[in-house]
Amino acid sequence: MVHQLSIEDFLSQSKEHITLDVRSEGEFNYGHILHATNLPLFNNEERKLVGTAYKQKNRNEAILLGLDIVGKKMANFIRFVKPLIKDNKAFVHCWRGGMRSGSMAWLLNLFGYEVFVLKGGYKSYRHHVLDIIAKKFNYIVIGGRTGSGKTAVLSELKKMGEQVIDLEALANHKGSAFGALGQEAQPSTEHFENLLSEELKKFDKNKRVWLEDESKTIGRVFLDLNFWNHLRLSPLFVIDLPLDVRVKRLVNDYGENMIEGLEKSITNIKKRLGNEQWKAALDALQQKEFAVAAQTTLHYYDKAYDKGISMKETKEIFRFAFEIDDLNAIAKTLINEADRKYGN
């Protein structure tokens, strides 16, 4: 039997079962439901051929070509799915809940499985994702100059039971010219939004959510406008640490194994540093004087961050000065202040 499910029912019922995304591997890699498995009805090239037949000939010719392609794969589709099926149930979707998911649903049902198709396909999931991201949560944004350990503080807050989103971890980027060093390839903006929505769904909407102060982009990932607007108007807790403490953290974070990447990243901001500062930073790297290189680049980053703070639209900016990089003490101070100002 084949059933049509809304996005909410599809997501809630499919988590313990195989979810087949029958779009091409290119579509899947660009963005997908997190627990879905890709089983393309057509691969990238085949999808292009069918689409060309539809445009240049007609719908029926495209269908015939599609049948020629899929017919040879049917047995392997079943062989792939068979060991993954639980309780005789399979969940299927394509882009819009059309012919691709319908074809796979027919095949699986023919083999005796109970099949559940996502009404509206992945497109309906994307609407669901954007609706979640657009919601207003009780965000508190953590700011601070480069090297202030904002990400580490977020991790400490999470250990203390706070609701936390690490946007840079979701984006696989640390948010500066050096942000890609040591990171895996970034997701598309679309899939970043999918990841973000799944994090938000875990939270109690009545409790605060901590995250880091970010620009509109994290590397090549763009923040959704509704989400960004919520962040820029949320309370901002700024961590102030001495320069030498921040330099030490940066040296520990990047270090000797990334010299080549650091040189490239410093060259990327050459115009902003100025020729003299750029040369000084590169010379320091070559001499393995990492603290000198970090301090040189911080001259630019500190000015840029301070300018950004002065242009913030939120009316609630609170600064917290610390002499040492004690993550536990910093996190406790932020929690206590948040409790005092907004309750827990």
Image (cartoon, helix red, strand yellow):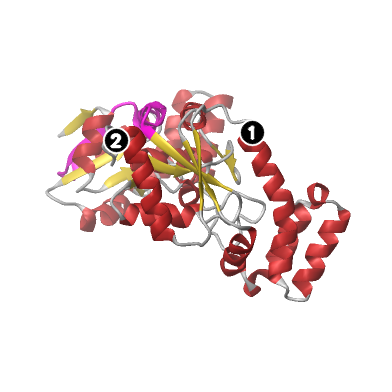
Q: Is 27 on the left or on the right of 56, as rendered?
A: left
Q: How many other residues sit within 10 Å of disc 2, few (<14), some (14-19) or many (≥20)?
A: few
What residue is drawn where x is 33% and y is 38%? Answer: 340
Quarter residue 99 falls in:
top left
Q: Name the mark on residue 343.
A: 2
Marks 2 and 1 sit apart, C-alpha to C-alpha, by 27 Å
Say which amino acid is labelled 1: Ser
275 up-or-down from 118: above or below: below
Where does the magenta region start and end? 109-138
Quadrant position of the C terminus in the picture: top left
Give percent across and percent down for residue 132. 36, 30
- Amino acid type indicated by mark 2: Gly
Q: Which residue is mark 1?
A: 310
Taking 229 as reference, is 123 left or right? left
Query: Which residue is rendered at x = 13% and y = 47% of the image?
Result: 88
Identify the secondary structure beneath mark 2: loop
**Which quadrant holds residue 343?**
top left
- Let me know if residue 222 is in the magenta part: no
226 or 212: nearer the eye? 212
